Image (tube, grey):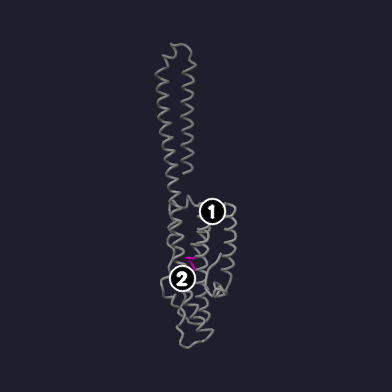
Amino acid sequence: MRNIKQAMKLIAIISLGILIISIIFNLILGSKERKERYNTFFTSIIGLSSTFLGITLGLYFNEIEVERQNRASTFKYLEVALSDVETVQGMMFDGYKDELGKYYGKHIIKHDSVLNVGILRSSEIPFPVTLETILKSDIYPKHLPSRLYDQLNFCFHNSANYKKLIQNLNTDTSKLQDQQLLKDTKDYISLLGFCHYIIETELNFEKDIITNAEAESEYIDGLKKIKEMLENNELNQFLDKELQILEVRF
């Protein structure tokens, strides 16, 4: 797109240059006889240059309008992605809370009647397909800020890996295996939270709610936080002990 624009600009400049030179030469020819002799030639040159310049400028401004519409479409789809990620995270939270409760009943309280941990292993794990759509599109990546594109790639590939890990765990019901299931699920939810965070940050910048410097700072803080969360092996990491609820906070 950028190369096409540059080519159009160059063509427009050349056409305008030819047009100006033709007009100047027509004015400085001097005698009436010379003007009449070259009149047809210069008239043709001026006409062709004007037509070519008009067509080139028309195509150039059309490209600008198409790019503007594509950019608007990209950020509109980011709103859809934000809702999609939030929905998937909510679904995974419900499964995680259920598995966490059964884990504590089975391995901590050692309640005989508690159900086994591991329903998630045999369940279809939801995934925000809008992320894949954005990253594999021919249009959307061109209009995403590089900072957002890089972090969406990070979220997409790592989330996809954790989704596979959750479903590929064997049927071993040992405490270690149950812990691994909860750890992978927790990390998957954390990545979804980070994904939601960076999309929301970029949308806030786009809407002039925050400045570019504030957005950059939030990206840095969010990346630092997600790395800490992924390194944290505490299974009830999401527990807000005061409110007694589970939540992901960046």
Q: Which residue is mark 1?
A: 209
Against 241, residue 250 (above or below) is above
State which quadrant residue 147 falls in: bottom right
Give the label, 1 or 2, closer to the camera. Answer: 1
The dot on residue 14 is none
Report the front residue among 32 and 213.
Answer: 213
| Residue at (48% x, 19% y) in the render | 25
- What span is in magenta? 159-164
Q: Which residue is mark 2?
A: 92
State which quadrant residue 223 falls in: bottom right
**Residue 31 horizontal/vertical position (percent):** 46, 11
Against 25, residue 215 (above or below) is below
| Residue at (49% x, 63% y) in the render | 157
Against 53, residue 173 (above or below) is below
Q: Give the residue type at disc 1.
A: Ile
**Residue 62 horizontal/vertical position (percent):** 42, 40
| Residue at (42% x, 62% y) in the render | 129
10 Å neighbourhood of mark 2: few (<14), some, or many (≥20)? many
